[in-house]
Every structure is written in structure tokens, then in C-alpha cells.
Amino acid sequence: MMIKFTKILSVCLLTISVITSCHQTQKFDREKWNSGDGLDYPMRDDIVDDLVHNHKLKGLKYWGVIHLLKYPQSRDSVSFSYQIISTYTNTFKHNHVKNLVLYMGKDSIINKVEVYDNKAKVKSVLY
């Protein structure tokens, strides 16, 4: 009975280990952030957590963010966003979308940062 429990526990721990190792957080690096072909940015998902937690984005001016991250994929009068993940189904509908979204006031200073993920159960407003 104890051997069976140990085997089940080992399989569960191995499964958890594999799942958590799929997304490895790495330190933010400007070159990694910008590596991609314009449609896909394979390194961004691994470094976005370090970027938003260890680099002060709130309080920066728009041009300070551009200096750090280069130009965003989309922009309007109050926000701009950087694509992290964008996958499509066979019918060209978005399957998974994850973006870093920065909101700015009239003075072009960032006043809110969030990571939008349509697959996440909880909306992630960082600050």
C-alpha cells in the first residue's frame, strides 16, 4: 500500500515539475524583448514578469518606454501595448492573446500597467 502511494506521489510531483518548468521566468533584456519577426516574439513571455516587477514603468514618459522597449504593436490616445503571445486557430481567430498594456495620462506619463491575458482567470493590473 505504501509503495503504491509513493509511486502515485512521485508521478504527481513529476507532473507538477514539468508543468511549472514550461514557463521559465528570465531577467529582462532589451535584445531578447525585441527578438522576433514582427509577428512572433518568442522571448517576451519569459521576461515580461521581470520587466514589470523589477523595472519601473509607471512614472516613465512615453518616450522613456519607447527607449526601453522600442515601438509598441498598437497605440491609441490613452494606451499602447506590446504583443507577448498571439496564436490563431485555423479560421484565423485569436486563440491566445497576451499583451503588456501601458496607460498614460494627458502628460504622456505612464499611470497604469497591466498584462492582459485572455486565457487568465484573473485580470492582472500590476500598478
Image (cartoon, helix red, strand yellow):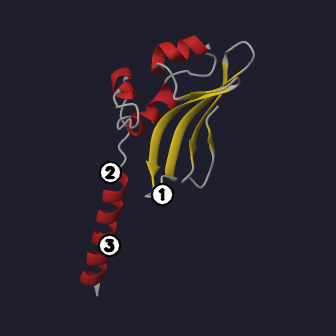
**Dot 3 or dot 2, earlier in sequence:** 3
Determine whether, in the image, residue 74 is placed left or right of residue 49: right
Per the image, the residue denoted by label 3 is: 9
Q: Position of residue 52 (x, y in %)?
A: 52, 30
Q: Which amino acid is tagged 3?
A: Leu
Q: CA distance from mark 1 to mark 3?
A: 41 Å
Residue type at mark 1 is Thr
Q: Quadrant of residue 108?
A: top right
Instruction: State the SS at label 1.
Output: loop
Q: Of residues 92 and 96, which is closer to you in this image?
A: 92
Residue 45 coordinates in the image, percent (x, y): 42, 39
Disc 3 secondary structure class: helix
* Quadrant holding the N terminus: bottom left
* Disc marking residue 91: 1
Nearer to the camera, 123 or 17: 123
Locate the C terminus by quadrant: top right
Q: CA distance from mark 1 to mark 2?
A: 31 Å
20 or 92, nearer to the observer: 92
Q: Which residue is mark 2?
A: 21
Q: Which mark is residue 117?
A: none
Element at label 2: helix
Mark 1 surroundings within 10 Å by alpha-carbon count, few (fewer than 14), some (14 through 19), many (20 or more): few
The percent position of residue 124, horizontal first and vertical second, equals: 61, 43
Compare marks 1 and 3 and give the one earlier in the sequence.
Answer: 3
**Picture layout, residue 16 above or below residue 62:** below
Q: Are marks 1 and 2 in contact (CB under 8 Å)?
A: no
Instruction: Estimate how packed mark 2 is, as few (under 14), some (14 to 19) or many (20 or more) residues with alpha carbons within 10 Å.
Output: few
Considering only vertical position in the picture, is 117 above or below 53? below
